[in-house]
């Protein structure tokens, strides 16, 4: 339960020289809204092309596959990144996309797989930080910027995409949208419908990149050194 909300809002309103707290969002009738039109005329295949071009700029490998070939494609990507240990979410989409058998076979091959377990709390972080690769699904994918949007929460720890040396994002093709505008609209719709919102929403654009004022790029300071996107045709 929220406590002291009315008193807090009344204090903010008084500082803004308002006699009452606004209960309805003010309308903003912009003359021009290019954000609503940019790339919206593109087909899903064209958005994949835009995403691929952007991935080249953000030092991220993009691989296309279908659900049937996904287990082998993921295995090849994991091998290319040096194998385990691996960290994954507790997420039914691994099963839905036919990856459960592959995930269960890896430990038999000496490749450890840690599935985020809410019941062990911070011990998850200790395990994940020792992982070589983190693997998650993308909830929304922004073609324009090459960004994956992750809805973290119970069973879906933020650190799975942050602490391992490398990161692989599994991107259902249907999640690809033109740009940030559509992601914001989807999240806003969830709020308006009273749905539960992820405790943490992360926008990740390739591997960690940092640069100083002289434009000297350093990769991997604040996250994975390498990143790959696997786009899955889920039509």
Image (tube, grey):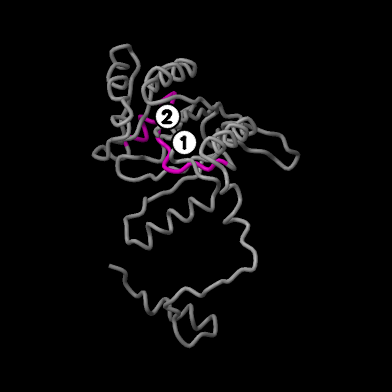
Residue 134, disc: 2
For mark 1, what is the residue? 162
Q: Secondary structure at mark 2?
A: strand
Q: Marks 1 and 2, Cα distance to the nearest angstrom?
A: 8 Å
Quadrant position of the N terminus in the picture: bottom left
Q: Is residue 103 above or below residue 214?
A: above
Q: How many marks?
A: 2
Dots 1 and 2: beta carbons under 8 Å?
Answer: yes
Q: Residue at x 54, y 50 (%)?
A: 180
Q: Residues within 10 Å of mark 2 (few under 14, many from 20)?
A: many
Q: Which residues are magenta?
A: 123-143
Q: Nearer the viewer, residue 121 or 92?
A: 92
Seen from this angle, which residue lies furthest top? 109
Q: Nearer the viewer, residue 103 or 143?
A: 143
Residue 225, disc: none
Quarter where residue 106 is shown: top left
């Amino acid at each position: 339960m929220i406590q002291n909300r009315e008193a807090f809002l009344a204090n903010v309103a008084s500082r803004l020289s308002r006699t009452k707290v606004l209960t309805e969002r003010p309308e903003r009738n912009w003359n021009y809204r290019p954000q609503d039109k940019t790339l919206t005329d593109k087909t899903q295949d064209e958005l994949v092309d835009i995403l691929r071009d952007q991935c080249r700029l953000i030092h991220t490998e993009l691989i296309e596959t279908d659900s049937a070939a996904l287990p082998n494609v993921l295995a090849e990507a994991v091998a290319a990144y040096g194998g385990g240990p691996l960290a994954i979410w507790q997420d039914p989409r691994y099963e839905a996309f036919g990856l459960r058998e592959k995930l269960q076979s890896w430990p038999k091959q000496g490749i450890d797989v840690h599935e985020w377990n809410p019941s062990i709390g911070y011990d998850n972080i200790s395990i994940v930080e020792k992982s070589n690769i983190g693997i998650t699904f993308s909830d929304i994918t922004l073609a324009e910027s090459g960004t994956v949007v992750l809805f973290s929460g119970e069973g879906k720890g933020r650190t799975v995409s942050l602490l391992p040396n490398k990161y692989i994002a599994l991107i259902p093709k249907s999640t690809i949208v033109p740009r940030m505008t559509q992601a914001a609209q989807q999240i806003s719709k969830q709020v308006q419908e009273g749905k539960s919102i992820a405790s943490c929403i992360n926008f990740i654009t390739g591997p960690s990149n940092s640069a100083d004022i002289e434009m000297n790029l350093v990769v991997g300071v604040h996250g994975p050194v390498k990143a790959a996107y696997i786009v899955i045709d889920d039509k």
